Amino acid sequence: MRLRALAVLGLTLLWSGHVISADLVAPSEPQQEEKGIWAAIAYSQSDSKYGFFWGADKRQEAKDIAQKYCENAGGKACNVVSVFRNHRHWTDDDETGFPYKHCGALAMADKVENRFTPWGVNSAETRREAEDLALRACEASGAKCKIREWVCT
């Protein structure tokens, strides 16, 4: 009888939304707010379309809008390929570990051949460094590349 009473109590608690388990993990703390001015680059390798956005208050906002711009440009397989940020204030260190790389660049081969077009993307603290890194990544395939877009937040 006691076993049956415990079973009924357990089912009642379960049905009422209360969970009985010693294995429960405490909910994680909310993610710390990431400070800065955000930018993102989205690229569609299958058709060499791209989209950029800068000036967002949140990382996800920059990613979503860059993705949408890429799709609006006709990209059929757009993906966010770079996200970077700038300090809104020089005291912005939010201790999240996400670097403050102010500029980003997208390089593509001179000759666009859609899904086989070599490309490269990178971010850095300066426009020149971001462009150089993106060009190096693109030209690693042996193609002659040029910067298609750059942005600094």
Image (cartoon, rainbow, N blue to C red):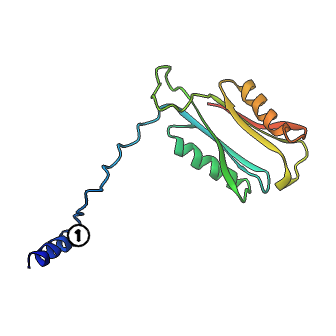
> Where is residue 141 shown, x and y percent of the image?
86, 42
> Where is residue 29 shown, x and y percent of the image?
35, 43
- 10 Å neighbourhood of mark 1: few (<14), some, or many (≥20)? few
Most extreme residue toward the left, as rendered? 1
> Which image quarter: residue 18?
bottom left
Q: Does residue 54 appear in the picture of this structure?
A: no
Along the viewing direction, whichever of 29 and 152 lies nearer the viewer: 29
Residue drawn at x 45%, y 28% is 95
* Residue linked to disc 1: 14
Residue drawn at x 53%, y 45% is 61
Does 51 appear above or below 39?
below
> Which image quarter: residue 9?
bottom left
Say left or right for 91 vs 100.
left
User: Disc 1 marks which amino acid?
Assistant: Leu
Along the viewing direction, whichever of 72 and 105 lies nearer the viewer: 105
Q: Quadrant of the C terminus?
A: top right
Q: Quadrant of the N terminus?
A: bottom left
| Label 1: element kind | helix
Residue drawn at x 68%, y 24% is 126
Does 14 appear above or below 152?
below
Say left or right for 55 vs 31.
right
Along the viewing direction, whichever of 79 and 8 lies nearer the viewer: 8
> Where is residue 131 shown, x and y percent of the image?
76, 30
Q: Does residue 98 appear in the picture of this structure?
A: yes
Along the viewing direction, whichever of 84 and 64 lies nearer the viewer: 84
> Where is residue 32 shown, x and y percent of the image?
41, 37
Residue drawn at x 30%, y 55% is 24
Does 88 appear above or below 61?
above
**Number of numbered labels in the structure image:** 1
